[in-house]
Image (cartoon, helix red, strand yellow):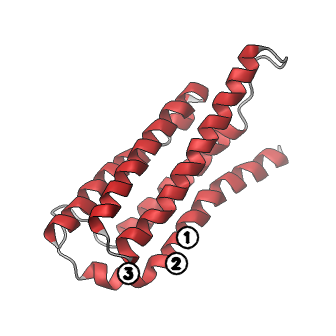
Amino acid sequence: MKREWKTLIVCILIPLAVGTVAGFLTRGGMESFASLNKPPLSPPAWVFPVAWTILYTLMGISSYFIYVSETQNHNHSNKNTKENNGKSQALSTYGYQLIVNFLWPAFFFNFQWYFFAFLWLVLLWVLVAKMILEFGEISKTAALLNIPYLLWLSFAGYLNLGVWLLN
């Protein structure tokens, strides 16, 4: 049981570290962001770190469910190989979306490439949707834990596009 708790903690810490480093690297862009025209429904600044902490934690928990998932058949059948490939693919997609997620704040806050950041966010949305589908083939719970992430990215896309249009 200890090993599973350690794995869970590591799985949660990975996306939290991605978010923390991205936040640290983009903290200088927050002043200019504060002065921008923002679209209606823009939340106060404190909402973003709270929302992202929750989302990164949910991502980590969901990745844990995928990582520790066992195939039903432990022999070397084609079904087992297919299931392991599905697990590897799902975790790869998870990794790719974390990388894309990590880069978005730099494009938006540091470089102020608002339209490019919006397009990058669309890429992230597609990767997260793909990840949810792949996770769902292995663990419905893991897939469902990422629905808030996809919804938040949709809202972030609205905000990002609004900032580009208004500035």
Front residue of this view, candidates 18 and 42: 18
Mark 1 lies on residue:
20
Disc number placed over residue 70 in the picture, else none: none
Residue at position x 43%, y 71% in the image: 106
Where is mark 3, residue-wise?
Answer: 29
Which comes sooner in the sequence, label 2 or label 3? 2
Mark 3 Cα shell of 10 Å, populated few (<14), some (14-19), many (≥20): some
In this rendering, position of residue 167 left or right of residue 107: left
User: Which sits in the foreground, 150 or 2?
Assistant: 150
Q: Could you tell me residue 99's position as x and y percent?
A: 54, 57
SS at badge 2: helix
Task: Name the image quarter holding residue 89.
Answer: top right
Task: Judge the density around disc 1: few (<14), some (14-19), many (≥20) Cα neighbours within 10 Å.
Answer: some
Residue 15 placement: quadrant: bottom right
**Picture quarter with the N terminus:** top right
Q: Residue at x 74, y 15 (%)?
A: 78
Q: Is residue 124 left or right of residue 57?
A: left
Q: Amino acid at mark 3?
A: Gly
Specify few, some or many for label 2: CA neighbours under 10 Å numbering under 14, 14-19, or 20 or more: few
Distance between the Cα atoms at labels 3 and 1?
Answer: 15 Å
Q: CA distance from mark 1 to mark 2?
A: 6 Å
Question: Sequence order check: which comes first, mark 3 or mark 1?
Answer: 1
Q: Which mark is residue 24?
A: 2
**Displayed quadrant of residue 121:** bottom left
Q: Amino acid at mark 1?
A: Thr
